[in-house]
Amino acid sequence: MKLDRLWRWAVLAGVAAWAVWYGSPFFPPPTVIADRMYHTWFSGPPSHLFLTSTAVGNILPSLGRVACGLAIAVALAVPAGLAIGRSRTVMDYADPLVGFARTLPPVALVPVFIVIFKLGTQMVVAAIAFGAIWPVLLNTIDGARSIDQVQMETARAYRLPWHQRVTRLILPAAAPKIFAGLRLSLSLALVLMVVAELVGTANGIGYEMDNAANTFDLPGLWSGIVLLGILGLAQGVQCFRRDMPLDAFGD
């Protein structure tokens, strides 16, 4: 195990050394990128958690859009998934619609959201919510369908009301798969946030990256890319266990 970790760090060090030695204008050295990240994002006062005004004006709005999009996705997906998973009739009607809608690329629908919501935060949140809803929905359906029938029969025998069956039996039993779907949705939300901000906002990480690309500021562009990698790593490590299985979306 320790040898594997050493190899991983050795590969990372090798890539960094290659980047420094190669000297391509399109791949700035890691030291240049780190310096730009520090001055752009993390050189602020301690009272602001070392965040600069640029960071406060761009990172926080981006994270807020991700949070709003995920909240909308979860609020819609969990009740709908429980209803579809526990009702054969609803499943028969909803299955072809869900199967078609989840195959639509969320990135391809960004122009549609621009037409509907115009440019701005609403468009970005709508794109994030549309892309993030499917992993949660499909995992919720799968979790609701896989509940032990003996437990359901016991709940009926004790004549538990439907709302108690949902809150005390169905939802807790489906929770592991719901959180597995949410983990996938978090990663998708970051991707969709960047794509939508590249074309539709006046602030945000994607907006800053687009400005850097238009002005050929490659260190600034790479600082945004590395920042997104850090955010993605943080959501994978802090929000969930790394060994949590990623369940299949279901049938």
Image: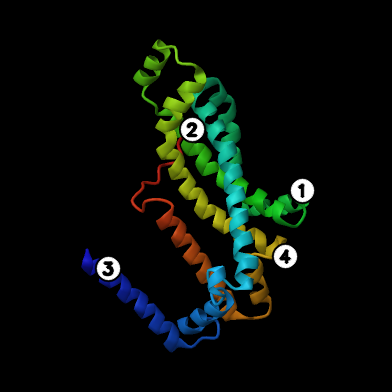
Amino acid identity at mark 1: Ile
Query: Which residue matches tag 4?
Result: 202
Viewer-nearest of discs 4 and 2:
4
Return the residue nearer the eye: 47 or 90: 47
**Is 92 above or below relative to 50?**
above
**Is 135 above or below relative to 161?**
below
**Residue at 49% across, 79% down:** 34
| CA separation in Å, label 4 and label 3 | 41 Å
Return the residue nearer the eye: 156 or 11: 156
Chain-order first, disc 3 or disc 2? 3
Query: Which residue matches tag 2?
Result: 141
Query: Which residue matches tag 1?
Result: 116
Q: Please provide percent x and percent y for residue 83.
A: 54, 27
> Which SS class for mark 2?
helix
Query: Which residue matches tag 3?
Result: 5
**Is 6 above or below relative to 179?**
below
Chain-order first, disc 1 or disc 4? 1
> Which SS class for mark 3?
helix
**Residue at 55% across, 70% down:** 47
Amino acid identity at mark 2: Ile
| CA separation in Å, label 3 and label 2 | 38 Å
Q: For residue 48, which quarter of the picture? A: bottom right
Q: Please provide percent x and percent y for residue 246.
A: 40, 46
Rate crowding at label 1 as few (under 14), some (14 to 19) or many (20 or more) other CA atoms within 10 Å: few
